Image (tube, helix red, strand yellow):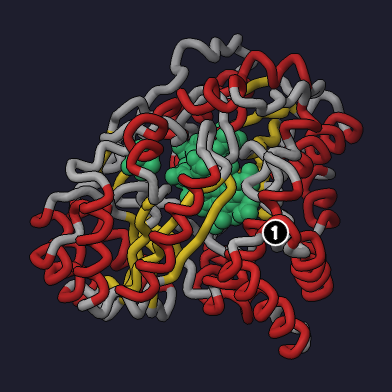
């Protein structure tokens, strides 16, 4: 009889991202299992070495659950599945996360060794599955598929077992807390369309307060990321969140829609200690925003401009996120985005900007448009593992991604290249600035920059 019930593994999500936030994808379902009395271990392959995984598997758990995001995380997921099955084919493997949620039939055909899959939120379903595995019962994945959880009734992802990972996150000012799941909008590129279908689940303020109180007892927290995709427009709720954060003297960041960033909202956010906001700007083209993305900004680009002017007068730093390589986007429309980006930088002195290459994910309307405009559908697991924010559309866009990264995100440069000589980075930064000004991204040496980042991350790990 195995002493251990379930090992939950979070494979490395990306080769180049330095993100150290807690792996909520496995901590939430795991905390629910722990609460129900199961013996659970967690492995985050960003921080745990392969040896740790091997030692835990040698304890022969009943099951190993693995998280899957479309893209690089699938490389690690495949290795874990193969390792577990080679070690002992009786250990059950369970795949969860966004990739299997939107691709379940294909995934099971493409990758051998997966015994079970969980579609959508994992808390309730994993408990049911573990109950079946433990009691030798048949599990029907369709029965609870996509069952949404109530954020007020699930246990906190902070447990004795996950605490060490929270410590790592806190040291990097990256503790993440969710106060909502899903989004009431349905932008054509966003996974929310495929997974939550317009649902927006809120956590009660008293539960949020308890969560912050617990975290604060354990760690000396200076900053928290409220990892909601969209914190909403309910001023009373945001004020309550801010009051709690103020009480614990915690600064925070979250995501909000541009048209809601008005002076009265900014006032509430500033008073509550919010120091940074993520804003999905997406494009400087009215046509792209309306016809392609379905962004549903009531006044279109005017909302984005007003948001920028308002934030420019505040103490909050906006992270303005753009996309490029959008299906049907013309060169002129991309130039509109670049011009808008320059205007934002001039108007808001605290602005940070990011240009992300659109990565097509199935289950969304824009995926169909991407296929129709030349995106080659990945044919198997290995090809899906290469779908990435920077590489989906070839070298030109990879160059664009790294050029804009170096041009706009000087705040991230030190984090991305911690050990590289400043003069080498400076050379690339100067080059990126020049290419941006001349709008000549095609020849920017993006691959060299990427290799520098990856080499550096691996040297330091
Ligand atoms: C944080 C985050 C990251 C972090 C992850 C590290 C960290 N923990 O800090 C970083 C920054 C590294 C990251 C990277 C990427 N990310 Co990301 N990321 C997110 C984000 C914002 C939050 C993830 C999260 O914690 N969610 C909260 C948890 C509770 O939800 P969840 O992950 O869905 O997990 C639930 C279920 O899926 C399920 N579940 C998940 N895993 C498992 C495992 C088992 C065994 C079980 C039973 C259940 C289960 O149960 C969970 C609880 O209900 C999401 C958006 C979102 N709101 O989810 C995008 C998201 C997950 N990312 C996404 C992607 C694609 C990426 C990239 C891989 C993009 C790429 N392909 O290049 C990049 C990596 C490359 C790069 N250049 O950065 C997509 C995934 C879409 C998809 N089809 O897979 C999302 C949904 C955003 C989007 N674009 O729409 N990401
Ligand atoms: S508003 Fe943001 S989170 Fe909501 S559907 Fe659009 S992109 Fe997704």
**Residue with the mark numbered 1:** 46
Q: Is residue 248 left or right of residue 51?
A: left
Give the percent coordinates (x, y) of residue 238: 17, 59
Identified at 25% across, 60% down, the residue is 305
Q: Residue furthest right?
A: 86
Is 164 positioned to the left or the right of 191 in the image?
Answer: right
Q: Quadrant of the C terminus?
A: bottom right
Residue 8 rendering spot, x and y as whole percentages: 64, 43
Tell me the residue at 57%/74% (across/down): 412
Q: Quadrant of the N terminus?
A: top right
Compared to 141, does 421 lie above or below?
A: below
Q: Residues within 10 Å of mark 1 (few under 14, many from 20)?
A: some
Q: Is residue 436 above or below residue 363?
A: below
Q: Give whichever of 452, 43 is nearer the camera.
A: 452
Q: Quadrant of ligand 1?
A: top right
- Tell me where residue 69 appears, x and y as whole percent: 61, 39
Asked whether the viewer can see residue 157, the reply is: yes
The quarter holding residue 413 reads bottom right
Q: How many marks?
A: 1
In-image side of 377 versus 183 (left or right): right
| Residue 23 seen in this snapshot | no
The residue at the point 39 percent across, 23 percent down is: 147
Q: Quick check: is the Cβ at mark 1 less than 8 Å away from ligand 1?
A: yes
User: Which one is in front, 158 or 421?
Assistant: 421
Secondary structure under tag 1 reads loop
Q: Nearer the viewer, residue 157 or 295?
A: 295
| Residue 241, x across and y down, in percent | 20, 62
Which residue appears at 37% of the width and 47% of the height? Answer: 229
């Amino acid at each position: 009889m195995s002493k251990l019930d379930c090992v939950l593994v979070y494979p490395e999500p990306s080769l180049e991202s330095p993100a150290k936030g807690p792996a909520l994808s496995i901590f939430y379902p795991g905390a629910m299992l722990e609460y129900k009395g199961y013996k659970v271990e967690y492995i985050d392959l960003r921080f745990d070495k392969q040896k740790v995984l091997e030692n835990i598997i040698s304890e022969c758990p009943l099951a190993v659950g693995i998280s899957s995001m479309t893209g690089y995380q699938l490389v690690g997921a495949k290795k874990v599945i193969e390792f577990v099955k080679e070690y002992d084919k009786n250990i059950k493997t369970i795949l969860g996360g966004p990739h299997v949620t939107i691709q379940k039939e294909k995934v099971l055909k493409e990758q051998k060794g997966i015994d079970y899959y969980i579609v959508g939120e994992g808390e309730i379903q994993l408990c049911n599955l573990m109950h079946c595995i433990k009691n030798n019962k048949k599990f029907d994945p369709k029965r609870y598929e996509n069952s949404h959880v109530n954020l007020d009734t699930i246990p906190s992802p902070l447990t004795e077992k996950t605490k060490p990972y929270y410590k790592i996150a806190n040291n990097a000012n990256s503790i993440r807390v969710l106060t909502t799941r899903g989004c009431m909008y349905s932008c054509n590129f966003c996974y929310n369309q495929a997974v939550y279908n317009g649902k927006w689940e809120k956590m009660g303020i008293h539960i949020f307060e308890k969560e912050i109180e617990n975290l604060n007892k354990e760690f000396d927290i200076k900053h928290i990321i409220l990892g909601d995709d969209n914190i909403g427009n309910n001023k009373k709720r945001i004020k309550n969140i801010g009051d709690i954060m103020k009480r614990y003297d915690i600064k925070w960041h979250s995501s909000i829609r541009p048209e809601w960033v008005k002076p009265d909202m900014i006032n509430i956010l500033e008073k509550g200690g919010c120091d940074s906001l993520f804003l999905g700007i997406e494009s400087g083209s009215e046509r792209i925003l309306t016809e392609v993305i379905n962004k549903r900004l009531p006044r279109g680009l005017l909302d984005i401009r007003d948001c920028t002017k308002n934030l420019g007068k505040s103490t909050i730093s906006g992270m303005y996120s753009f996309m490029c390589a959008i299906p049907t986007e013309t060169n002129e429309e991309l130039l509109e985005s670049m011009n808008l980006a320059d205007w934002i930088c001039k108007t808001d002195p605290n602005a940070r900007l990011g240009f992300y290459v659109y990565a097509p994910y199935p289950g969304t309307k824009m995926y169909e448009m991407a296929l129709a405009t030349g995106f080659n559908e990945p044919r198997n697991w290995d090809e899906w593992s290469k779908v990435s924010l920077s590489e989906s559309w070839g070298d030109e866009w990879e160059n664009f991604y790294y050029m804009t990264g170096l041009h706009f995100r000087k705040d991230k440069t030190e984090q991305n290249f911690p050990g590289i000589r400043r003069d080498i980075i400076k050379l690339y930064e100067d080059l990126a600035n020049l290419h941006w000004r001349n709008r000549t991204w095609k020849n920017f040496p993006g691959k060299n920059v990427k290799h520098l980042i990856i080499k550096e991350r691996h040297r330091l790990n």
